[in-house]
Every structure is written in C-alpha cells, then in structure tokens.
Image: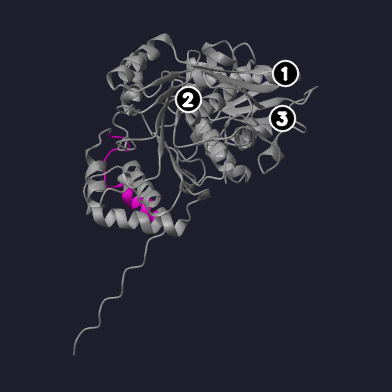
Amino acid sequence: MNPSPAAPLPSPSLEELLARLARLHPHRIDLTLERVTRLLAALDHPERKLPPVIHVAGTNGKGSTLAFLRAILEAAGLRVHVYTSPWLVRINESIRLAGALVSDDVLRETLLECERVNAGNPVTRFEIETVAALLLFARHPADAVLLETGLGGRLDATNVIEAPAACVLTPIGMDHTEFLGPTIEAIAAEKAGIIKRNVPVISAAQSPEALTVIEARAKRMRAPLHAAEETWHVGVEHGRLVYQDERGLLDLAAPKLFGRHQVDNAGLAIATLRAIDNFRIGHAAFEAGIAAAQWPARMQRLTAGALVARAPRDAEIWLDGGHNADGGRVVSAAIGDLEERVSRPLVLIVGMMANKDADAFLANFAGLTRHIIAVPIPDRDGAMPVAQLAEAIRRLGMRAETAVSVDAALQFLAQLAYEIPPRILITGSLYLAGHVLAANGTAVT
C-alpha cells in the first residue's frame, strides 16, 4: 500500500514570513550591493524593466519630497509606484502600486517568490523587501517609480537602477554616523553615490561641505546639477508658494503639510519634475499636487483617537518623527510658528533610539519649553533607556520626567492644572510615531 502524499505545508502569514526572512542575515543592516544584484539577476533583472525612476536620497525630508512628487504626478493623471522606508504601522505602507498600498496577499506571495529564488543565501530583510518592490513595479503598469533610499545611497539596496530619470538629494546632515562616517563630507559622499552618469541631479539647499561633495560627484559623472538657491528658488509670498527657475515662475497654493521646511521640500519636488524631459507637468497639476500632498508623522495634527482622549481637554497634539539635529531644527521652527499664531504652553513627549544624539536633537527646543517627558519606544530593540534620555534633557537645563508610555504621559498631563490648554509634541523617532498612530487608531493610507 502506497503511503498517502504529505499534506502541503500551510502558507505563512505575512508577519511569520517577515520574521523568517529576518533570520537570513545576522545583522539588520549590512551595506553592500552584492546580495541584491545577485538576487535581481536570478529574477531576470526586474530593475531593468521599470518606468522612469526618480531616486531620492538624503538625511531629512525624503518622505515628504516623495509625497509631493507623487501628489503632483497623480494630479497630472499619471500612475505612480512608490517605495519608501521605514514604515510606520505596517509594512504595506512601503510599497504603493499605481496609487494603492500593496495588499497582504500580493506582498506575501512576492516575498515567498523572492525567498525561493534566494535559496537560503544570506540577505538582509530590507534587501529582500527592496527586491520584492522592484519585482512588483516591473510587473504592474505605471508611468513613474519613486524610489527612496533606506540608508545612505552608494551601497543602499535601492542603488541598482543604472539609468534613473533623476537623482534627488534632500538636505544632508549628521545621522547614522556608525554606517556612513563621522563627518558631513563622508555622509554626503555616501548619499551622492546615487548620482549616475549624465542623469540630472536635483539638490535641496545644503551646507557648504555637503554641496562641495555633491558638485564634485556631479562633475565627475557629467550629471547636470540643479541646486537650490543657485538654479532654482522657492519661498512664500502672501501665503502662496512661489517657485522660480530659468523656465519661469510658478505661483502656487501653499502646502497642506505644515512647517517652513515643507515649502523647501515642495520646491525640490517641483525642481525635479521640471528637470525631467519625460514629464510635462502643467500649472494645474503643480497647484493641485502641492496643496493635496500628505505624509503621516511629519508635523501631523492628531485631533481624535484613543490617545487623544487621554490628553488634557482641548490640548493640541502634534506628532513628528524627527530624530536628529536637523530634524529637530525644522520641527522646532514649525512649533515656533505655531506659538506666534496662538501661544500655548509646550510639552514634549520624547522617545529616541540609543544610536541618536539626544542632546543635539533636544537642544533645538530649549528656548520653547522647559518640560519634557521621556518615554520608551515599545517593542523596539536598541531604544534609548528613559533614564539616559532624561539625563540628556536635564543637561540642557530642562525639566525632565519619565513615563512608562505615551498613554501614561498624556494621562499625567491631563491631571495638571493648565490655565491655557497645552500644545503637546510627541517626537524623537519614527518608530515611536508609528506606535502612536497605531495606539491612537489613526489609519495610514
């Protein structure tokens, strides 16, 4: 009697599969292109079968710039694929197929295919996720691909596009020094590694040190450089966004995204699309896209939800994932603008990762508040202990308290007697921001 064939193993859930993929490499980050190029070759090079690609690197503002790019292109009637990182609440946020977030089933099946082809070879989870995104982009029709680097640029898993339509550099600052180098020049060299021969480079305003590196790389690659404050300019006049370059002037609605820095990010998106011959974007699409762009956890106002209900009555609650010195600078400037409009006592609820410079980030808020509550980042290895974060706060001369969670911090503030309802900023980490959105019940779409 022949034995019955073995029943097929059940397909893993997306969460189980992601956990399994994370075990394929001993480290979460290991910068190299060798594993990605090997896997892409085994999949018949999907990275060579894509619509025009806009590749974006930088320290701050990448996600917001991509949000403006997507909104403008979609306002022009184009279909857009988008790959971003990190995700906030669920991994599906990282991959957008022609406007819609990838479904669990489609992502799981694509990752399973990549896992089979990888055949157990070492690969980081970000690398295999990037390959899956490129495979999906190659298989689904679209008019453009927006591709954000994960870390750095030169050795980032996304840096496999041989001839993108444009290479974009957002502001470069000090972050991830353990991987990218201890100086602005070293970090800029890694970021500028995405620049390709004869491909236009569009750069945000940079420090002199970073710009020197970018200019040298662009010259070496014969890549036309479109630099902010040199070949294009953006600002606000009478509540309108005004953009100007050699092709003329655009008078547009101001961004919905809050903060002066979002004007700069919008300008970078406009400059990028005007530098690409593939796209002919009309004034109406620029107007509609700039006004419509949204990006969660970047000076996002939370007005309802489970956590908001814990806060002091009528408090303003803002959420921002800023986590480095430059990120703190632009967020504190946005908070300063709010204070000029309507004055309220400011309280920060802060959680950070241990590899971040808490002093450099928090110093930006020393003139705005003297009250900061340090909280842990739940379920996150490498989070900064609250006692260490509180000590950094005290070093800056600010009042430091600790709470076991954002929820507990909000409940504590609700017990205090405020003559004017406070303005509460939850900040310090995108991981913390993702936890807040999930706990508050705020959808990310």
What is the total number of numbered labels drawn onto the structure image? 3
Numbered disc in front, either 2 or 1? 1
Number of residues whose C-alpha sits closer than 10 Å to that of mark 3, classed few (under 14), some (14–19) or many (20 or more): some
Kindly identify which residue carries mark 1: 238
- Measured in 3D between alpha carbons, the distance from the residue under mark 2 to the one under mark 1, in whole angstroms, is 27 Å
Q: Is residue 363 visible?
A: yes
Question: Which residue is rendered at x = 30% and y = 21% of the image?
Answer: 222
- Measured in 3D between alpha carbons, the distance from the residue under mark 1 to the one under mark 3, in whole angstroms, is 26 Å
Kindly identify which residue carries mark 3: 316
Apparent side of residue 106 relative to residue 220 in the rendered image (left or right): right
Q: Which mark is residue 95?
A: none
Numbered disc in front, either 2 or 3? 2
Q: Answer yes or no: do the residues labelled 1 and 3 have beta carbons within 8 Å?
A: no
Q: Earlier in the sequence, mark 2 or mark 1?
A: 2
Q: Position of residue 204 (x, y in %)?
A: 47, 20
Amino acid of disc 3: Glu
Numbered disc in front, either 1 or 3? 1
Q: Answer yes or no: do the residues labelled 2 and 3 have beta carbons within 8 Å?
A: no
Question: Which residue is rendered at x = 41% and y = 18% of the image?
Answer: 174
Say what secondary structure mark 1 lies in. Answer: loop
Amino acid of disc 2: Asn
Q: Position of residue 445 (x, y in %)?
A: 57, 46
- Measured in 3D between alpha carbons, the distance from the residue under mark 2 to the one under mark 3, in whole angstroms, is 25 Å
For residue 424, what is the image quadrant?
top right
Kindly identify which residue carries mark 2: 60
Amino acid of disc 1: His
Is 131 drawn above or below residue 412 in the view shown? below
Say what secondary structure mark 3 lies in. Answer: strand
Q: Residue furthest left?
A: 1
For the N terminus, the quadrant is: bottom left
Question: Which residue is rendered at x = 46% and y = 41% of the image?
Answer: 379
